[in-house]
Amino acid sequence: MASSHFLCSHHLYSSSNGKTQFSSFKKGSFSQPSSFKPHGSSSLGKKSRFSRTHWVRATASDSKTGRKQVEVAYNLEDKFNKLADEVDKDVGMSRLTLFSPCKINVFLRITGKRADGYHDLASLFHVISLGDKIKFSLSPSKSTDRLSTNVPGVPLDERNLIHLDKKVPTGAGLGGGSSNAATALWAANQFSGCVATEKELQEWSGEIGSDIPFFFSQGAAYCTGRGEVVEDITPPIPFDLPMVLIKPQEACSTAEVYKVIYRSFKLVVPSVDKTSKIDPLSLLEKISSNGISQDVCVNDLEPPAFEVLPSLKRLKQRIIAAGRGQYDAVFMSGSGSTIVGVGSPDPPQFVYDDDEYKDVFLSEANFITRPTNQWYTEPLSTDACTSPTGSSRSIE
């Protein structure tokens, strides 16, 4: 996963390898550290940071007989470890690294137009193993927040909710920004001593963005309203079911996609039917009973997105045709422009052969969830954003 740094009224923490150096004094068989450089979450090193065990030994002998009378020995490493534990108790948490995963919409139904200008939706959201890694660090109280990123186009002024280096592509319909915001809220709560409950974080986050509350679910949820009404469900899809994400260089404007939907809802008899009529609860029941199939992976934002970006429709059609049954379902996530193929981690060969797709973003992924009162963890086996040959295919 990509690394990133988040600064919360504090400065950026940049790690470096601490080294412990020792000078030996032959007289009295005594060894002591001449310099000690702290590394990690406290001002003293932990056991794993020492390459070998060091002992302090002092002896005394009778000058007349030469017989040893007193010998004192103790493990220096153990002493430093105990002292570091005491420091950590007093200082509290100062650094935190969290995985910030994205999501896909297994199905997404637009059920109506709201008075506040938004649309009502009903969708099965599910967290997947592709994500960013964000490093949070406390800094001196007099310093100001600083933002940086590895992705061109991510705003660094007041428009940006957090600081990050991204691996999840922007404009993809994967909720990467919403996940980053949720991860930042989780981290802020951890630094504050967990003053808020998960439920409170979920409720508050709805004021920031519609998709953010979902990430405070357990990872699989039936979402309604603007997306902020989140109902945890038992994960209906096996975690070992693979998928491939294919995002072309072009991004879909969410605003433009919803404009097309809005025009459709404004018409008494829409000239082009841009929404499905199937009951979203029946889709959820079918997936829970029979798993993923093409007929249940309905996304009402696909037709308007394909109108905004016709090349995206062509990409989906080519994936289905070239896949020859290797995918259980092929569909767009969110408002695009990522096309998801569930059932295989491998993209079709034309993605590698055609110059038209030389700049696409590719990633394999799986479904994941999280335990209560813990944040998401990065799966060990995830090899995101690489082709089968290991070369990067990210558009970012």
Image (cartoon, grey):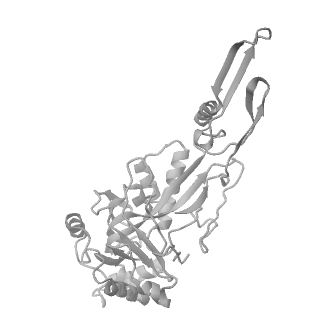
Residue 192 spot, x, y in % from top left: 55, 44
Q: At 52% across and 41% down in the image, what residue appears?
A: 193
Farthest residue to the top: give it.
64
Q: At 40% across and 64% down in the image, what residue appears?
A: 128
Q: Is residue 366 left or right of residue 140?
A: left
Q: At 30% across and 80% down in the image, what residue appears?
A: 275
Residue 383 versus residue 15: which sits nearer the camera?
383
Q: At 64% across and 64% down in the image, what residue appears?
A: 148
**For residue 237, what is the image quadrant?**
bottom left
Q: Is 333 located above or below residue 61 in the figure?
A: below
Q: Is 313 located above or below residue 75 in the figure?
A: below
Q: Is 165 located above or below residue 64 in the figure?
A: below
Residue 246 spot, x, y in % from top left: 43, 78
**For residue 38, what is the image quadrant?**
top right
**For residue 43, what is the image quadrant?**
top right
Residue 163 spot, x, y in % from top left: 60, 61
Farthest residue to the front: give it.
65
